Image (cartoon, grey):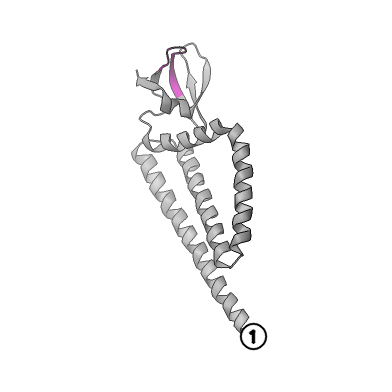
């Protein structure tokens, strides 16, 4: 009898886990459609929209994992202890690479609100190193610029948000 109760309890948890999986799948499809529609409306490149979709999918996967772990009744004190230690370790590792994280965040912000597109000629207003170039590609961490002399410049995305940029 005790074994029967245990099995029925697991069937409910399995059913809810499957429902969560289906919900994550549906959310992925919705997010993909919204991002692709936005990309089409604002003439963003396919590579950038795929990258943003990948970011949102990763976020959904992390949330699914957290909800599933909590739902299945994992001891939260041990789980939060492990998560705290992992976040501390990652935080120390990212402290040395803070610019990488800021470039990634800037790349996501630029996707939704960047007024420039591939092929635009721009001038970056920097008193020490002014740059006049054409945008060749916009990636997650940096933007590829080509100067009139043919130089290829990899410009960090976070600097685009910090410097004044003029369309020529």
Image point (42%, 25%), residue name: 162
Q: Quadrant of residue 35?
A: top left
Q: Quadrant of the N terminus?
A: bottom right
Looking at the image, residue 143 lies above or below residue 105: above
Image point (42%, 34%), residue name: 110
Left or right relative to 124: residue 14? right
54 and 128: which is toward the camera: 128
Looking at the image, residue 61 lies above or below residue 1: above
For the question of whether residue 51 can be seen, the reply is yes
Whole-percent x, y for residue 78 in the image: 63, 59
Image point (50%, 45%), residue name: 55
110 and 1: which is toward the camera: 1
Please tell me whether residue 128 belongs to the stretch shown in magenta: yes
Please tell me whether residue 56 belongs to the stretch shown in magenta: no
Residue reaching furthest to the bottom? 1
For the question of whether residue 140 can be seen, the reply is no
Whole-percent x, y for residue 62 in the image: 54, 53
Q: Quadrant of the C terminus?
A: top left
Whole-percent x, y for residue 53 in the image: 47, 46
Q: Which residue position is annotated with label 1? A: 2
- The magenta stretch is 125-135
Label 1, residues with CA under 10 Å away: few <14, some 14-19, many ≥20: few
Whole-percent x, y for residue 138 in the image: 47, 30
User: Secondary structure under badge 1?
Assistant: helix
Looking at the image, residue 144 lies above or below residue 19: above
5 and 124: which is toward the camera: 5
Looking at the image, residue 16 lies above or below residue 93: below
Image point (44%, 56%), residue name: 27
């Amino acid at each position: 009898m005790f074994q029967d109760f245990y099995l029925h309890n697991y069937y409910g948890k399995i059913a809810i886990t499957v429902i969560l999986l289906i919900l994550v799948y549906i959310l992925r499809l919705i997010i993909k459609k919204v991002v692709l529609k936005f990309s089409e409306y604002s003439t963003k490149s396919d590579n950038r929209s795929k990258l943003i979709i990948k970011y949102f999918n990763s976020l959904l996967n992390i949330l699914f994992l957290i909800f599933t772990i909590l739902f299945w009744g994992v001891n939260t004190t041990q789980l939060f202890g492990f998560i705290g230690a992992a976040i501390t370790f990652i935080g120390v590792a990212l402290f040395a690479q803070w610019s990488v994280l800021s470039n990634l965040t800037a790349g996501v912000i630029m996707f939704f609100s960047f007024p420039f597109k591939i092929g635009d000629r721009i001038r970056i207003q920097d008193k020490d190193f002014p740059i006049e170039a054409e945008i060749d590609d916009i990636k997650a961490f940096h933007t590829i610029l080509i100067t009139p002399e043919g130089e290829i410049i990899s410009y960090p995305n976070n600097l685009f948000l910090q410097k004044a940029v003029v369309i020529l």
